[in-house]
Structures are given as structure tokens and as C-alpha cells.
Amino acid sequence: MSLFKRNNTVKTGPNADDMLAKMALSNIHDGVIITDRTGIVKFANPAAIAMTECSGVGNAVGLDYALVIKIESKEGREFTASDNPLTIAMTTGQPLDNHIVCLVTCPGSKRIPIALSVIIEDGGDASRIITFRNVTKELAEDSEQAEFISTASHEMRTPVASIEGYLSLALNPQTATIDERARGYLTAAHNASQHLGRLFKDLLDTTKLADGHVHPHFEPVEMVGTVKQIADGYAMPAKNAKLNYQFGSNRSKSISESRKLDQVVYGYVDVNFMREIIGNLIENAIKYTPAGGSVYVNVRGDGDRVLINVTDTGIGISGDDIHHIFQKFYRADNSDTRTIGGTGLGLYIVKQRVEAMGGTVWAESAFGEGSTFYVSLPRITGEEYEKRMIAVRNAALVQNNTNQPIVNNSIVNNPNGGIK
Ligand code: ADP
């Protein structure tokens, strides 16, 4: 008998379907909680009860979902009402897809990393389906993999740096004499070794990010001066690439808009993160803009945000690619990018860094028509800047007096800087 032949003895119909659905929900390892539109629990499967350590199905049904499933950020931070992804999904009706958070068990004693989803069903009594899956093992495996990549990249960077150094010596007319053919071969080898070095650096940064090893060291900063200083470091590479390079200019803005650069704009950021973010965006703008084109960098205050843009007149990004460019290892596949070296990690690192500082990054572009990358970061007032500067100075004084090492002259990992 064929395995696929319908077995006529299996009953079908509404009751039988209900039974099968119940059987499936009772036996899966994922927690499933179904609520009505107002968030009152209508159903919780045994896995949900076991994971939340809620004392029983009967006790969960009829309760507000927030009493049954409590979450914290994956780093163990308590959410506020406005940044709790579950609350937002439940109240706005925006679905949530495999968001990694920590489940706090009902007695509050344990934290379990979970992938949390909320499905919104229109109509009917049961309209919100919350599902969650224990991802402890997956995260441990990811962490092991990241550890391996991180160690391997770290170890391989040293010999690659040495190869690059010797190739530079071989190519330098003051340290070596070579014929033109050898110069061609060695230049190709030098470019490849630089690419490899960059790949290892990016891999190392990516694994550190994945492991949550990199925390911002926030400090109060005047943003226009800071971004200008970073941008100035790329004047020479832009000149070498035969590009018109300007800071404080934005071809899409009127002169009165660009005058806003005279503004003093304050932020509370990690300056090293800023170097990486702005540096990566400018390097890309230079890399993806053919000679004769232009690159503009601009900073301005925009309400309670600081808005930075890096604009180029280069090859642009197609509508299909633009949704993916911030993903790990993604590179647009076209004849231009194929000839331009890259790892596909730069924008992923940029996004992680920007988000770690409470910001957002996005791109606007059309293929063949240049691109603008925007970074929006929280802005602080002049008054807040002064207060935070005083706090930084005081912290430095205390550290000096107690002979503690000063970490980056800043208050570590606290976006509020300890001041209300
Ligand atoms: P890569 O090392 O490949 O440059 P990134 O993560 O920095 O990696 O960028 C991802 C992809 O986004 C690039 O491969 C390229 O296709 C596209 N891209 C990034 N910046 C630009 C730009 N300024 N102009 C055109 N395409 C860009």
C-alpha cells in the first residue's frame, strides 16, 4: 500500500481537526499563548506553562498576558513600556518575528533566552498568538562558533600583516629593486593581502558584536566638530581617487540648509564607534564612486536627533539590493561591485554600532544615480552636554584619586550618564 494513500479510517471534520490541533499544541516544545484583542489569555499550551513556570493552565487563562509572560532584553535589562517589544506588538497589533529576549519565569528566579513572535489574527475572539522558543542551545552554539572565528581571525591577522609589510617593502623603490613585471605581480599580491587583512578585521569585529563583547563608552560630544575631524582623515584617499570631497555640503540641500552646519549640535556617543561608522560610510562612498564624482558629508540637528549624511554621486544601489545591504556578508552583485573589493561586513558593523548608541541608519539610492547614507542619533541639549561634561570630569577626578584606570575618559555603557 502506498504510504501516501488516504487512510479512510482517520476521522475528519471540525471536531477531529480541533483534536489534532490540540494534540499538536500539547506536544510541541514551543510555548504558545493565545489571547483576545485586549490581551486576556484564552489558551496556554503545556510548554508555555512549563517555561513561564506559571502554576497551571487554569491559572493562566483569564489573566492579562503580561502577568504570565514577562521579558527582559537579551542583555538582562528591564524594558520600559515604550521599548518592550511584546507590549508594543500586543498594543499596536504590529507582528513580532523571532525577536531574541530573555523570558523571566513567573517566580522571577530564572532567565531563559527565547525567540519571541507575536502573530496578529484579525477577527474572532482569539486574536493574538504569542509563541516562544528556548534558544539557549542555539545561542551557545553561535557563541562557540563566534569564539572559533574570532580566535582564527585574530591568529591569522598577524601573518597577514607581516606578508603585507614585506610586500610593501618589495614595492618601495627605496628598499627594493624589481622589474615592471614583478611589480605587477607584487601589487596584485599586496592588494589581495590588504583585502585579507580587512576581512579578518571585519570578521573579528563581527564576532565581537555577536557575542555582545562590544559596549559603547558614551561621552558628551560636539557632533559637528567630531564628524568633521573624522571626515578630514579621508581627504587624501578621496583626492587619490580623483573625487571632489566636501564636508558641510550636501548637494540635495539648499545653501541655507547647509549653513545649519554653523549650528552647535551635541550628542552622547562612543567616539570610537563614530570613527568606525563614519569611516566605513566614507570609505564606501569613495570606493563606489568613479573618478570625477563627488562625496559630501553633512551633520545637522534635526529636532531631538543628530542627522549625519554621507552622499556620493557613484554607482548607486538597486531597489532589490537596498533592503539587504545591512545584512552580514551581503554584496550587491553587479558588474561594478564585482570588480571592487569588499567583504560585505562593513554596513553590518555600521548598523550594529549605530543601534548600540540608540540610533538608526538607512540608505536612499537609485542604481546609477549615487547614494546617501543617513545616520540618526539621539541629540542632547547644550545644558545636558554641560551637565554630562561635569559628570565626566568628576568621574575622572574620583578615578585619579583612587588610582583606577580611566576607561576612554567616559562613563561606561550608560546612555543616561547617571544624570537625570
Ligand atoms: P563591502 O565590503 O562589500 O563594501 P559593505 O557592507 O560596506 O561591504 O557594503 C555592502 C554592499 O552595499 C556593497 O557590497 C555594495 O554593493 C553596497 N554599497 C555600500 N555602500 C555603497 C555606496 N556608497 N554606493 C554603492 N553601493 C554601496
Image: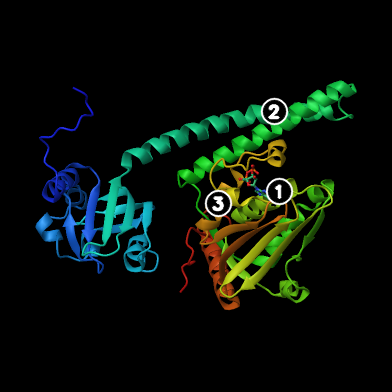
Q: CA distance from mark 2 to mark 1?
A: 24 Å
Left or right: 384 as drawn, with respect to 136 = right
Mark number for residue 301? none
Q: Quadrant of residue 158?
A: top right
Residue pointed to by mark 2: 162
- Compared to residue 328, the image places residue 264 above or below, namely below
Q: Is residue 152 above or below residue 326?
A: above
Mark 2 or mark 3, which has the lower sequence index? 2
Residue at 65%, 34% (x, y): give it.
197
Q: Is residue 170 left or right of residue 54?
A: right
On whether ligand 1 comes within 8 Å of the CB at mark 1, the answer is: yes
What's the amino acid at mark 3? Answer: His
Q: Which mark is residue 283?
A: 1
Q: Nearer the viewer, residue 238 or 363?
A: 363
Closer-to-camera residue (57/75): 57
Residue under the point 51% across and 63% down:
398
The residue under label 1 is which amino acid type? Glu
Secondary structure at badge 1 equals helix
**Secondary element type, mark 2:** helix
Q: In this orientation, does residue 307 appear? A: yes
Q: Determine which residue is flagged by label 3.
A: 323
* CA gap, disc 2 and disc 3: 38 Å
Mark 3, other Cα within 10 Å: few <14 / some 14–19 / many ≥20: few
Instruction: Specify which label sits upstream in the sequence, 2 or 1.
Output: 2
What residue appears at the point 33 percent right and 61 percent down from the top-left corner?
86
**126 is higher (above) or lower (below) than 185:** below
Callout 1: 10 Å neighbours few (<14), some, many (20+)? some
Q: Position of residue 102 (x, y in %)?
A: 32, 52
The kind of residue tagged 2 is Ser
